[in-house]
Amino acid sequence: MRPLAGFFNTLRESLMEFAAGGDAPLVVVLTPGPFNETFFEHAYLARQLGLPLVQGQDLTVRADTVFMKTLLGLRRVHAILRRMDDDYCDPLELRPDSALGVPGMLGAVRAGRVVLANALGSGLLESAAWQGFLPGAAEALLGEPLRLPSVATWWCGERPALDYVVTHLEQLVVKGTFPNQKFEPLFGRDLGREARASLIRRLRGRPYAYVAQERVSLSQAPSWRASAALRLAPRTLTMRVYAVATPSGYQVMPGGLARIAAEGVVDIVSSQRGGGSKDVWVLADRDMREAEPQILPRRVRHDELPSQLVENLYWLGRYSERCEDKARLVRATLAMRTNATVWRRAREQCIGYGVLPREGDPARTVFDDAHEAGLAADLGRLGWCATQSRSRLSAEHWRSISLMQRQFQEAGATQNDPLDALDRLLVALTALSGFALDDMTQDDGWRLLMLGRRLERVQFLAALLSDRLAARTPPLQGELEWLLDVGGLSITYRTRYVSTPQLAPALQLLVFEQGSPRALGFQWHAIRLALADLAQILGAAPDDQLDEPIAQLTTLSSVGIEQQGEQSAARRQSLSTALSELAAAAAQVSDRLVLRHFSHVDLDLHTVAT
Amino acid sequence: MSPVRYAVRHETLYTYGREVLHSHQQLHLTPRSFARQRCLEHRIRIDPQPAVCSEHFDAFGNRVTRVELDRPHAHLQVVATMELSLEAPRALPLAEGESWERVRDELLYTACPREPQWLEAMRFRGESPFVRIKRLFGEFASDCLVPGSTVLEVAGRLMAKVHAEFTYAPGETEIATPLLEVFHKRRGVCQDYAHLMIACLRSAGLAARYVSGYLCTQSSAEEPQAERTALLGADASHAWVAVFAPPFDWIEFDPTNNVCVQQQHVALAWGRDFSDVSPLRGVLLGGGTHTLAVRVAVRRLRIQQPDRTAGLTR
């Protein structure tokens, strides 16, 4: 098959060529965002091209120049590959209700400070009306007939065309001229007398708003369906092809996209009516050799991450960790149901975090995403952040996230034992952390993702331990097992101490251990390194909020805190206080990160007119 | 009648609930010069001081000021002052000129090359963001569309009909109120009157423009020596309609007041509808809720040195 990579290279290189930005122009792909039905294609395109995928809010116009908001500040954008409708691009001059566009973009285009592909207004070419003019235009402009005949088309705005359409309605299909017109195509042969008369009235009233085309029989292709009696069936299809303008002429993609109708033989194929789309490939000549790799100018750019994307990655990290923590917490708690005292206390703590309900079946709440602070709701948020940062996730990474969510939902629907579902969820969540460590480019976005994970873990574990240590009595053995289980350190404990859990060594492991990635000590160490890195990149002083609580904690020790006496209780109390201060400091670090790097993303843009 | 002179002061003040961090504004506040009107002087003052301020002409030939504010600010004040000279009105022979049917047919597309004024007119014949073309509007206008009558006669009847059947009701509609709602309620303000009349004309296949500007409410009979009396030409900007009526080019009608536009209407800008010529339009980052105060004052000036004007024409 003919490879497509060359086409994408050409597209990227052409954009760079047109964007006069020196050696390394910044080119971005502009999408309306994940609510758009073709967002997947935008993310895919951006990944193929190796360009940042941005939404309107990621860009800003200053002095007729477009900039991308990145972690390191504003970066000039030289060219934009636009996947957004014309009239949504600039709320200042075009549709004022567009929350998707970039205010001032038209000014930048007018000033010639940014290349927009395709140019604004080119949406007009989507009108079927042009098809009627193509044969004549080819003759007039190129002096040759069309190589591929066009569907016979009459734009009713021409008087003779209108007359023809009115008298030949039987054989024609009538469409709207303008892409934003709400007009469903009508087939003349299907119309009764009244409908026909009404259509003719409309045509005469506003002839230029309608286009008529001859009815063509659409192509058929055999289509395979997994769940039907007749698996191989004919389906109508249409094809979408692509071409890119290069400084040396147009290049056509050796492939395309086919839309396949949901039903058998139909006259219209559109994605809004169901059906699906499939890739179209072009077979290569048998003896065509693998193309030589193109020698392209080396253009290297660093750290061009829109800050909104970085923010989403940060929250993806936090929610991944939060889900993992909550899943462990609920699983460990439900597993303790047989131990009445531990169950009561553990459940109380879960209720305090809002993970389990005070009333009702705790097992059902696990799957209920209407439960605000519950696991299912957080999984939903994780999914949202992943969708928003999809352009940075590998295909496997993304798939494992969607699979995880689907499995959990299915488990909820079939009322399976929640412990079972939680086990599987934890396997999937652990895989996510593996993806984070081994599958992602370790750039600023990744740094923030990991920082999100670690801050979340510190906040969760420090608060959990602090809560328990604040109680008057030392934890029972069952509670220690529960704490180690929630912390994910049961096995480490068992292999290291080969005994039933005791408070001092358990705390040593959960709090102070630097070698275990699940321990607080390991986390705070990593956070301080990450904050120092970040500060260096940004040329600012590192956030030192955590230093004091950490120093405080390291002066304490877990020795002799398991007795019943006053002294022991006081030691537990001061450890509890220090842990709670650590949790609070972690929350502050997070708030400050968000405020310092992402706050400008959050504000609403609005249009005002007198 | 002789030319008259006006001085206009148009002040817009936004007060924001929270600070605006950054904003882009687009101003249509520079009056046009054309056949019946000359702009002698104009000035726009903006507070706080904008980071960037530039001018260009839009697609309809209006002068647009673009402004960017990049420092946090809690208010935005724009004061446009201008001085204009309005020609003495020419008598309008309503019964002369081309019939509306002929103009309608001529405005349709043909493959032949067309004169520039017809091409220009065609831009104002189709739908625009605020003006839909509907059979409903055509039916409303039908008794004004007397066969064989001139475009000006049709426009005059239509203006009278809109004025008679609609009630001027300030505060009941806003910019975003759909025209169909205005049509059914039969109440609105000058913008609504203008949009409605334009919708009727376009639904009949004619070309019509939206003109934004100011109205001098001083009656023409008023003593000229009542000089420099501040006239609060209502308290905001005004809007009316221009219809393409060859061979007279574009003729203006004010359906809110049921008058042909003569020496009391100062035109700022024109476009397909309000959305093309909104005096001040902006996109803000931050700001929260805001309050808006608009004050317009139109003064009639006494002409002392008619020949001084030439040097000041922009």
Image (spheres, coloured by chain):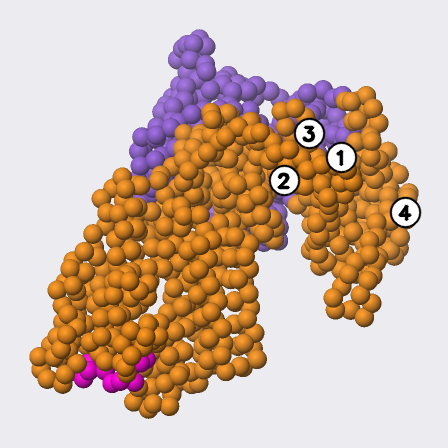
Kindly indicate whether the residues beneath marks 4 and 2 are on one polypeptide chain.
yes
Residue A439, how many percent across, how many down? 47, 53
Q: Is residue A328 above or below residue B181?
A: below
Q: Amino acid at mark 3?
A: Tyr
Disc nearer the start of the sequence (1/2)? 2
Chain letter of mark 4 equals A
Q: Quadrant of residue A377?
A: bottom left
Chain letter of mark 2 equals A
Side (left or right) of A379 relative to A589: right
Side (left or right) of A69 relative to A147: left
Q: Which part of the image, by quadrant, shows the C terminus of chain A? A: top left
Question: Which numbered dot is residue A171?
Answer: 4
Cα distance in 3D space between marks 4 and 1: 20 Å
Cα distance in 3D space between marks 1 and 3: 20 Å
- Circle 2 SS class: helix
Cα distance in 3D space between marks 4 and 2: 43 Å
Find disc 2 in the rendering and name its residue. Answer: A5
Indicate yes or no whether the magenta region holds residue A434. no
Question: Which chain is the one coloured orange?
Answer: A
Q: Residues within 10 Å of mark 2 (few under 14, many from 20)?
A: few
Q: Residues within 10 Å of mark 3 (few under 14, many from 20)?
A: few
Residue at position x 36%, y 43% in the image: A71
Q: Please say if the residues under marks 1 and 2 sit with CB atoms less than 8 Å apart.
A: no
Residue in the foreground of this view, choosing between A22 and B210: A22
- Circle 4 SS class: helix
Q: Disc 4 or disc 2, which is closer to the eye?
A: 2
Q: Amino acid at mark 4?
A: Gln
Q: Please say if the residues under marks 4 and 3 sit with CB atoms less than 8 Å apart.
A: no
Q: Which residues are magenta?
A: A471-483
Disc nearer the start of the sequence (4/2)? 2
Residue A165, how many percent across, how many down? 86, 41
Kindly indicate whether the residues beneath marks 4 and 3 are on one polypeptide chain.
yes
